[in-house]
Amino acid sequence: MDVYNAFLQGDLHDEVYMTLPEGFSSQGESPGSVCRLIKSLYGLKQASRQWNLKLSEALIQSGFTQSSCDHSLFIQRVNTNIVVILVYVDDMLIASDDLTLIQDTKDKLQQAFKINDLGPLKLFLGMEFSRSKEGIIMNQRKYAMELISDMGISGAKPASTPLYLNKKLTTKEYDDISGVFGDDELTDKESYQKLIGKLLYLTFTRLDICYGVQTLSQFMQRPKISHMEAGLRIVRYIKNQPGLGILLSSRKSEHMQAYCDADWGACPNTRKSVTRFLVKHGDSLISWKSKKQSTVSRSSAESEYRSMATTVSEIIQSGLIETQFLGTREEQADIMTKGLGRPQHEILLSKLGVFNIFATTSLRGSIGDRKIG
């Protein structure tokens, strides 16, 4: 759903004045006259906030509850059914397990605002959505192809993994581990910053590049040639499967699993450990993060406990949380901890429900007007 002239909907509770527009004239006005705004206008600093308040009030009055974790998420439960609205400025996604509730929600919104119904979800904020009997696949193929083209490597050889196996990147002039001098700083650091910014947006659906992007984002101020080369390798890896995306399974499940991992002293610059976690609801991946720990851990056990604490704070607790040990080959969060070899990298992707809809024939459905498989 898209709202027409959203920023003109907001009400102004404070006194806001503006100079008269060019060509405006009225009888009896004095030189230097101004007008007081009753409604919000585009370009006004308060416009986005006032529109958000207007929309939030309308949804809450209609029976929705605003999520305390994400204020752009609104939820309404009707008996055993649920309807969810996700808001981004003037665009809204409506999801429900009951088509009648979706239509009722549309009718309520139409009464409050002038809204354009864009139909079933296909594209939203650069993310593409495709349906099949297995579920919904979310990917950023179009965005990935544009990134490959912008970097001028459309004819380059694809890479099999985002980073080289156990590759450590540093800002030091002299690497204590390898015993060799580092490379020169990049003269055009703006191009590096733009690349990392674009890659960060791609991590919304590509958790397989989270570790590499998180590592490279630490060198934004003084990037080296080796950092740029590593960034371009990630783009070449994306070129290998630009349509890779997350399958949101259609199979019903009330089971939640969380995987966490830590790489002790992984950062060669600060010797801080790196925390990784991912959360799955049934077979569907719903949350993940790769982040450097705030303090230095004195042992690998301490870094693991810190990682576990971060993971537990992310999930919704309903009863007892049971912890289990997993071997290295079964640790699904390992893909966001370090550079892996191609076999293990591909094994973990399959376990996480990350598929290439353009190459997986078992995911039968449709992309637009084209059939899959």
Image (spheres, grey):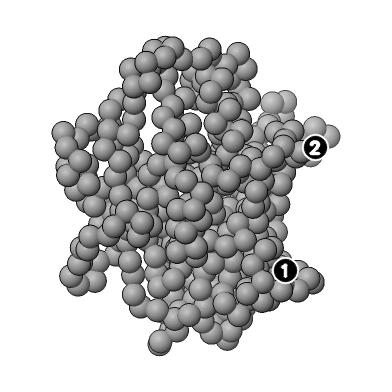
Is 109 on the left or on the right of 280, as rendered?
right
Helix, strand or loop at label 1? It is strand
Residue at (69%, 63%) from the top-left corner?
A: 358
Quarter of the N terminus within the rendering: bottom right
Q: Which disc is residue 133 wearing?
A: none
The reply to whether the C-beta atoms of the residues labelled 2 and 1 are less than 8 Å apart is no
What's the residue type where badge 1 is placed? Ile
Residue at (48%, 31%) from the top-left corner?
A: 216
Residue at (55%, 31%) from the top-left corner?
A: 230
Disc 1 packing (10 Å; few <14; some 14–19; many ≥20): some
Q: Which disc is residue 367 wearing?
A: 1
Residue at (46%, 68%) from the top-left corner?
A: 284
What's the residue type where badge 2 is placed? Phe
Depth check: give the residue in front, 68 or 155.
155
Task: Residue 132: give x, y in percent of width and height.
Answer: 63, 76
Quarter of the C terminus within the rendering: bottom right
Question: Can the viewer see residue 319?
Answer: yes
